[in-house]
Image (cartoon, rainbow, N blue to C red):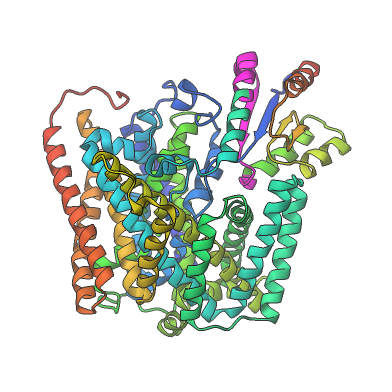
Amino acid sequence: MSALVLLVGAIIAFLLAYKFYGTYLAKKFELDDSNPTPAHTMSDGVDYVPAKAPVLLGHHFASIAGAAPIIGPVSAAVFGWIPAFLWIVLGGIFFGAVHDFSALVASVRHKGKSIAVVIESTIGDTGKKLFGIFAWLTLVLVIAAFINVVANTFVAVPQAGTASILFMGVALLYGFLVFRRNFPLAISTIAGVALLVVAIWLGILFPLVLAKTTWIALLLVYIVIASVTPVWILLQPRDYLNSFLLYALIGLAVIGVFFYNPTINAPAFVFTTNLGWLFPILFVTIACGAISGFHSLVASGTTAKQMYKETDAKFIGYGGMLIESTLAVVALITAIMVADYAGELANGGAVAVFSRGVGAFLGSIGVPLTLGVTFASLVVSAFALTTLDTATRLGRYVFQEFFEKVSATEGESKSIAANPYVATIVTVVISGWLALTSWSAIWPIFGSANQLLAALALLAVSVWLAKLGKDNRFVKYPMYFMFAVTLCSLVILSYKNFLAANWVLAVIAVLLFILAIILAVFANKTLKEVSGPPNTGVGAK
Amino acid sequence: MDNIKDRVIIIREQDELVASCCVPFDGEFVREFAKVDLFPETTAIIRTTGEFYQRLKEEYGDSIDVDVVDPRNQGYLFPRLIKDVFRYRVSIGQGLKTIFALRSPAVVCNGRLIMSGNKQLSVQVFDKVKQIIKVA
């Protein structure tokens, strides 16, 4: 069967969902353009700036897209193409897009405040504190998972290893010219993209063949250095070039898949795999391809403060997630068209499978295979590397802040744990230790943390709607499901890791499980407390 | 060009990164949980351009369009600049300047690049905008 049927079917389903379910949700939220958004009422030209829908979709989508919606679906293909495809499509429509849409609306109705503030106002200060602990644990998992992803990719596609190192050099040069010498953007970017092509070409000529543990060690050194250097040196310029690569990759992959017309070679259903059982592991493995808790932070961060009119929330929140799910379907296709999927996944990891698939797609439009594979590997690795050093930086800050707060509360002098170098070393050492365990053990726990955050955001929206006496079933049922998935997967994963003597992973899984239970109790208590208040309208603050 | 609404595009970075969907790395999240300003230079530019934005709004209200765009949002920015160059009938030289000489931060008024790469927005920039809008 042609895999194109899946892509076309998914696109049709997403368009219909946008038209009908998106409109239904907009009615439920009583979106009304006569209600001024915080971007207008609090306009300061700094944080609160009204931005029209196409501008804001560009900002929002660039923030929610990345490596994870590619890695998740490729890894989940192990469960067979039908369940993976169904969860991306149905999960995207009824869970992920609803989650992003509702987090955006809730934030807009709370003066554009972050979902963390919404959580605090709905389930109290304890919820916010737990959120801080959760954030650090998740960042450690993110670092471990992405170190593994990048190391696996560089082992499988050594050309991408060379190209990625050279790409850092290009980014350093770009940063110096643009941020310090004030060179014009268009000319610098054209030169940057040209140098990028040279980097890929040199990567193909001189592939860097190293062992996985060597790559892991190098990446650990890299993230320590990258996380303490000023952002304009490497992070901002690479981010700028990444944004070009993202659009190029998505555009070329979608065009290429139509020319290539791949055939499905994967089994339809597999209930028990090396990752675990189909339920709940499939749902945490696909992660961002169907629903991602991190999107609520993006939606309630910059996006809510810049929304021009209320009805734009459907286009940006609901529509943005459906575009990401489309990318997830393309990623899934690269996995299910491979005859020896298990072998390729074991030898090169998810990014290598995806890159070979995209390389084949690009081959059908005349791009040489090695060039296409190296290009796709470089793009995903570039995102993964950015994720790595941003997560390390953020992990350090969250760790420092937590201990500074503890010292201040107890009236003690500043704790040594609040020192930036100590905070960095602790974060990196734990992540590095985790990275040495198998990737297949880390990713589902990372996925669980991600889905727990999604459940938490859905909980905040459910409570908010219940407090207003409004129908909240469209967020409440997905919230219950996400809590069920998270709790079940964390129990299984804790047990599995204890048996495998992966102690750090097992402890993190247990901590996340306890956190999920506490939050579930909060949810139940708060939902009971707020049942049956007078209807004050969804727009009420 | 009487029927065409004037447009000012302010180009400046946001204090966030196009990192990945897994790391919420925007300025607010970092300020909220880590209490640091990670992008001090960007923040300073955002403040300066913010004052400029406010001044434009006070002077013109909704009678002109004002877009604030991150230079990384190329999916919107470059088609918009090219469209504006044609829409406001900018000369070839000016049009090429708008598209190729743009440095961040920048101000583009009716397809004309009137400020580029200057981190301090001078009074003259506002006066130039007023001039262009008046002529149009």
Residue situated in front as seen by the camera: B60 or B124: B124
* Nearer to the camera, A65 or A478: A65
Q: Position of residue A188 (x, y in %)?
A: 75, 52
Residue A370 placed where, x, y %?
Answer: 64, 78
For the point 27% across and 54% down, the residue is A452
Q: Is residue A83 above or below residue B5?
A: below
- Across and down, in percent, residue A410 comes to 23, 41
On the rendered image, what quadrant is the N terminus of chain A found in? bottom left
Above or below, comparing residue A75 to residue A229 in the picture: below
Q: How many marks?
A: 0
Q: Report whether residue A540 is seen.
A: yes
Confirm whether the magenta stretch covers residue B53: yes
Left or right: where does residue A205 sit relative to residue A49? right
- Viewer-side residue, A526 vs A256: A526
Q: Magenta segment, which residues?
A: B52-75
Does the segment drawn in magenta span residue B64? yes
